[in-house]
Amino acid sequence: MEPGGCEEMHEIVIVGGGLCGLATALALHKKGLKSVVLEKSETLRAAGAAIGVLPNGWRALDQLGVGSHLRSTSLPLQGTRMTWIDEGKEQYTHNKNIGEVRCLKRSDIVETFADALPPKTIRFGCEIASVEMDPLTSLPCIVLSNGKRIGAKILIGCDGSRSVVSSFLGVKPTKTFRISAIRGLTSYPNGHSFPLEFVRLISGQTKFGRLPINDKLVHWFINVHHGTDSKFPQEPELIKQRALEATSDHPKDVQEIIEGCDLDSLSFTHLRYHKPWDLMLGNFREKTVTVAGDAMHVMGPFLGQGGSAGIEDAVVLARNLAKTLKGGFDHEKVGEALDQYIKERRMRVVKLATQAYLTALLIENRPILTKFIVIAVMALFFKNPNAHVEYDCGHL
């Protein structure tokens, strides 16, 4: 029996086998560090259908050595086209001043990460019940829902917006926007004719978005306004019906996309976020325990940076740990490495979360005075609204 009553002990344990968890395991593997990923699902999970990846995200993916392969699964988007249906207005922005923008299917990303990992790195069916700290060794012990106890010298929580590891660290819980999202994929076996653009159609308080992934697959989403305590159907057919109802006044091709959707890809969820000031002041380390991805900084999707920010976390975290673990495990030095990781990431995610939060206030049904204040703040602090894509997480 290992210290703390644990049945086994590992150098590094990652909780959560989503984008950030697998990216972190891959980054550590690239630096010669072995880890174990505990995933509660029985298979690889890819909730959310797809994500947009901007230039900063591609820099991080290239550091992980998977950028070239993932580029082969998608086509570059040339620009963004916004149409206000009620007003008959349209605005087009070319991506030449932004850089490489693509939409990736989530399952393509997680499968690519998983395939690049050593066998048996991921353990499925491992639901985390709690985290305990051994008072004698000051090392964490993960308690699974079946009662099994797994020890770790280093524990990294990548377990999403309702993170057990975040709760252990005392991270403030997430809040809910007044906006929900229906997301899905639609396949076109014979190809589609949509332009390679991120298209957004706005009608009243409903926003429909369409992003081609490749010439036979399209990602789409609908943002609708709801109360923060609203309950949503989870059955695919009911989600599809709600999507059709929400876009009843949209062009015919929108309804056709929804009618032909892949039912298994559908999701209907509240949009959640961490308050920017909680990210500024929050504690993200206890001994040798830390968090990354949505477990640290879940944010609204309004900048298209949530997934990429988690992959950036993976690169920065692995880089700092690798420097420390070259000479073996040293409790104090690992703590310093985790502090450096948090220092490097804190202001980056605070800026992203703040810009996303302010954007949400403009989208939500808020008083005119509130919107005027938000516009003034954004003009002051975010003069270049696309500056976030210029960030470089650095070499692994």
Image (cartoon, rainbow, N blue to C red):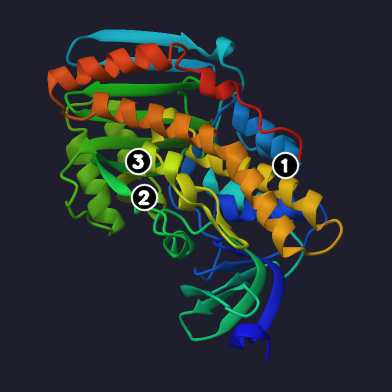
Q: Is residue 166 left or right of residue 320?
A: left
Indicate which disc residue 275 carries.
3
Q: Nearer the viewer, mark 3 or mark 1?
A: 3
Front-most of residues 311 and 196: 311
Q: Position of residue 270 (x, y in %)?
A: 28, 47
What residue did someone put label 2 on? 266
First in sequence, mark 2 or 3: give its number: 2
Q: Vertical placement of 84 versus 264: above or below?
A: above
Disc 1 residue crowd, few under 14, some 14–19, many 20+, Cα 10 Å: some
Q: Gap between marks 3 and 1, in whole Å?
A: 32 Å
Q: Vertical placement of 4 versus 35: above or below?
A: below
Callout 2 touching callout 3 (CB < 8 Å): no
**Amino acid at pointer 3:** Lys
Residue at 21% x, 47% y is 241
**Amino acid at pointer 1:** Val
What residue did someone put label 1 on? 66
Q: Nearer the viewer, mark 1 or mark 2?
A: 1
Residue 284 in sight here: yes
Q: Gap between marks 1 and 2, in whole Å?
A: 26 Å
Q: Gap between marks 2 and 3, in whole Å?
A: 27 Å
